[in-house]
Amino acid sequence: MRAYGRRRNQKFKQYKKHYNGIRARIETLASSQGIYRSRRGIFMGVCRGFADYFNFNVFWLRIITLILFLFTGFWPLGVMYIVAGMLLKMEPVSPFSNEKDQEFYDSYTHSRQSAIQRIKRKFENIERRIQRMEHTVTSREFDWK
């Protein structure tokens, strides 16, 4: 009985490792490589996002997508298109000036709550520093000379 449990546990670990590998590849493809859904797209911006990333003409990519959509019986490519539209992040409004901006944008699109908490902590830190400066400047011991 124990050997069966170990084998089952080992099999589960293999599946989990395989799943995490696929998940990591999808996240890498969707975030760090810079594939985004375009804000200027017609429907969800997937075709324009892929065309921008691969430096391909969006017109021809849409034609190819339409032809494949018609010849695959509508649902396979349609489902993949909608899934891609849901997985890909929206294109940033302005270009990133450095890696910190990229990291913040990725954290915001991944978890808005954590990004908002980070911003709140920064503003609270700034507010405390300003209060300390005000306290120092307005104290009786401060010399204006």
Image: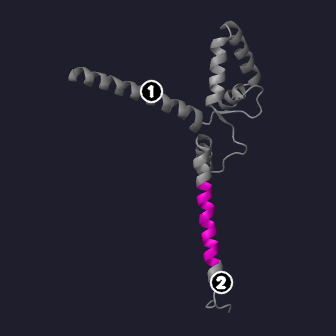
Magenta stretch: includes residue 56: no
The residue at the point 49 percent across, 30 percent down is 23
How many numbered discs, if any? 2
Q: Position of residue 66 (x, y in %)?
A: 73, 14
Q: Position of residue 24 (x, y in %)?
A: 49, 33
The numbered dot on residue 19 is 1
Which element is circle 1 on? Answer: helix
The residue at the point 56 percent across, 32 percent down is 29
Q: Amino acid at mark 2?
A: Val
Q: Quadrant of residue 57?
A: top right
Give the prevailing secondary structure in the magenta stretch. Answer: helix
Image quadrant holding the N terminus, namely top left
How many C-alpha atoms fall within 10 Å of the one at disc 1: few (<14), some, or many (≥20)? Answer: few
Q: CA distance from mark 2 to mark 1?
A: 59 Å
Q: Position of residue 19 (x, y in %)?
A: 44, 27
**Above-or-below relation of 73 to 13:** above
The numbered dot on residue 137 is 2
**Above-or-below relation of 35 to 75:** below
Q: Position of residue 131 (x, y in %)?
A: 63, 74
The residue at the point 25 percent across, 20 percent down is 4
Which residue is at the front of the view, 87 or 102? 87
Which residue is at the front of the view, 111 or 95? 111
Which residues lie in the magenta part? 118-133
Q: Amino acid at mark 1?
A: Tyr
Which color mode does the image show? one colour
Q: Quadrant of residue 50?
A: top right
| Mark earlier in primary sequence (2, 1) | 1
The residue at the point 62 percent across, 82 percent down is 136
